[in-house]
Image: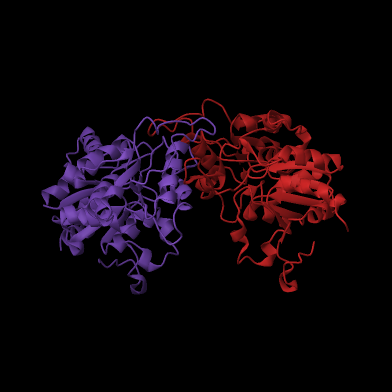
Chain colours: A red, B purple
């Protein structure tokens, strides 16, 4: 941790604002792997269509220094392949192996952890509430599913028409990924399987409660919609949540990229997901001001909840290039 | 309360099973107004298409004795008019004023209690999640609404298409009635209004968590779906719930029928809704075995949770006719 000469020593463990070329240089020396959240960090705006300043150049600079980079998002409405295309559309070259969505991580987690834990192979079917992007991730992992974009489930039911909703004892896992075509048929099928099939697991890609709407106000996220299903679960059972701030997403990133936690930093825009996620994974973190959290959100927080550093935007690290020209 | 000679005096305050002609006769003398739940009491089966034994004759017998009858259901998928037609289809003559659904009571409660409590008339618009039956009830009360069966809200949205979901500061009340065409557009609009409009109220017709599916397993009810919206509400705010076991439905029935609570009995099939509803309204209750609750559900319950009486089915009261022929 850098020492901020502007702060008295008693509160030195709060977040250190990175401002000077020398700060950036030292932080660059400190970390070999840089993990980035996407929304609010790489791009901004409800549609995610505006890049943050100099982000492409900053990523290229990190690569030129031999740093590992990866992108870790709680947004499962795009597949890894679609994210790669989105980066390419901005002229940023990113490999598919550098992209981790809570959706891709959920598919890997299902294949590697959840399904093998179900002893009876006849009960390993997955009911998916999710759209094309999730189906792509399932395909990449060689998983089969029921539901998804199946036209039988992509419907508004007629009143009291329960014909499509019947028990299916082969479903051992309900996997729910946020999607805007959610409807009663999907929710009732999931509820029915969770209530009727003993031991049936509920896996969420994330538990984000809400998000800001383009026109103002909030809309319910995956965490809010998933609450419908909680009553179908035994009281002692907690759903498994893959995305930030929970463990499984980071476990998948670590398994795939083999980063050294002591030499890795997570760069995000949200205290309650990104910074908490880093802390639970024992990673340092940098909070940027291009997204949701604002400097005033740090006031009154316990120091343990602070990121190690704050920074105006990711592109600011380019200032490190000036440090070599400065007198020591 | 009758004394059951088969029970020791120490537990005389538990539910008394009605079995003998003399029991029925005494209970008939005790109550002038008989309020009935419908599903599991008047009719049974997931489709509600099978009458309980001798129910039509039992209702006619009550009327012949000069008793007041009314029907009180937590099912808002039919309007009062549609319920009247359903009774008529079974050959049972019921007036529309004798039918109270949580939907009809919600419309009356909105008109009489909720809307007048909103001082700013420009903020008295209601956003309705509900289908034709609820719109009929709103019309009977002279209420206007947005949403309902409006085709703009009766949709499965395309991914990331938030265009229909925008703030509307005129909405002061979100009213949610169970319906199977529930979708993300409706939930997101409701969430947006509740999160963006200060003081916006949430009114539920009931908070039933789940119901048994015709083919087995459970499906989510209004209470489960409504949980999506709770995160949009200020922490101190509790949604207002009209249906059983909550107060407003009984207040509406009492206002309309002017029953005397001391001479009124509620007949239902569920301990946790019907019997609790009666207790909260300080009415006596009779639990019948034609629906959800079973005799074993009374075991281990505190006496305060017991109904005053239990009875195999409503039609059994016809046995009272034999009591006059018995020696005293």
Q: Position of residue B273 (x, y in %)?
A: 36, 55
Compared with A80, B264 (above or below) is: below
State the residue in front, A223 or A319: A319
State the residue in front, A10 or B12: A10
Q: Quadrant of the N terminus of chain A?
A: bottom right
Q: Residue at x 17, y 39 (%)?
A: B93
Residue B165 seen in the figure: yes
Q: Position of residue B175 (x, y in %)?
A: 34, 46
State the residue in front, B133 or A236: B133
Count numbered badges in the picture: 0
Q: Is residue A19 left or right of residue A154?
A: right
Q: Residue at x 81, y 42 (%)?
A: A62
Q: Is residue A104 left or right of residue B266?
A: right
State the residue in front, A77 or B17: A77
Q: Residue at x 86, y 43 (%)?
A: A65
Q: Quadrant of the C terminus of chain A?
A: bottom right
Q: Position of residue B262 (x, y in %)?
A: 19, 64
Q: Say which quarter of the image contains residue B244.
A: bottom left
Q: Residue at x 83, y 55 (%)?
A: A26
- Residue furthest to the top in view is A151
Residue A256 seen in the figure: no
Q: Say which quarter of the image contains residue B104.
A: top left
Q: Is residue B99 left or right of residue A158?
A: left
Compared with A112, A279 (above or below) is: below
Q: Position of residue A32 (x, y in %)?
A: 84, 48
């Amino acid at each position: 941790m850098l020492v901020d000469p502007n702060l008295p020593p008693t509160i030195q463990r709060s977040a250190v604002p990175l401002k000077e070329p020398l700060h950036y240089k030292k932080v660059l020396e400190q970390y070999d792997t840089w993990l980035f959240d996407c929304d609010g960090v790489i791009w901004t705006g409800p549609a995610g269509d505006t890049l943050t300043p100099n982000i492409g150049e900053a990523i290229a600079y990190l690569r030129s220094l031999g740093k590992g980079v990866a992108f870790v998002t709680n947004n499962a409405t795009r597949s890894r392949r679609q994210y790669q295309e989105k980066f390419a559309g901005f002229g940023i070259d990113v490999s598919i192996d550098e992209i981790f969505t809570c959706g891709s991580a959920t598919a890997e987690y299902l294949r590697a952890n959840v399904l093998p834990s179900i002893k009876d192979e006849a009960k390993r079917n997955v009911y998916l509430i999710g759209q094309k992007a999730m189906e792509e991730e399932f395909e990449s992992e060689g998983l089969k599913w029921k539901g998804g974009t199946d036209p039988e489930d992509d419907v508004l039911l007629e009143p009291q028409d329960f014909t499509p909703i019947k028990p299916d004892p082969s479903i051992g896992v309900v996997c729910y990924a946020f999607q805007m075509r959610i409807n009663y048929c999907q929710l009732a099928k999931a509820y029915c399987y969770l209530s009727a099939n003993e031991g049936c697991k509920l896996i969420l890609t994330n538990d984000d409660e809400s998000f800001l709407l383009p026109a103002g106000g909030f809309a319910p996220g995956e965490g809010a919609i998933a609450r419908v299903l909680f009553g179908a679960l035994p009281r002692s059972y907690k759903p498994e949540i893959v995305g930030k701030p929970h463990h499984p997403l980071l476990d998948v990133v670590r398994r795939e990229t083999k980063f050294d936690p002591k030499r890795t930093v997570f760069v995000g825009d949200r205290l309650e997901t990104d910074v908490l996620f880093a802390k639970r994974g024992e990673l340092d973190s940098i909070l940027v001001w291009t997204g949701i959290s604002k400097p005033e959100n740090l006031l009154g927080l316990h120091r343990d909840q602070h990121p190690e550093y704050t920074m105006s935007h990711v592109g600011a690290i380019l200032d490190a290039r000036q440090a070599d020209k400065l007198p020591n």
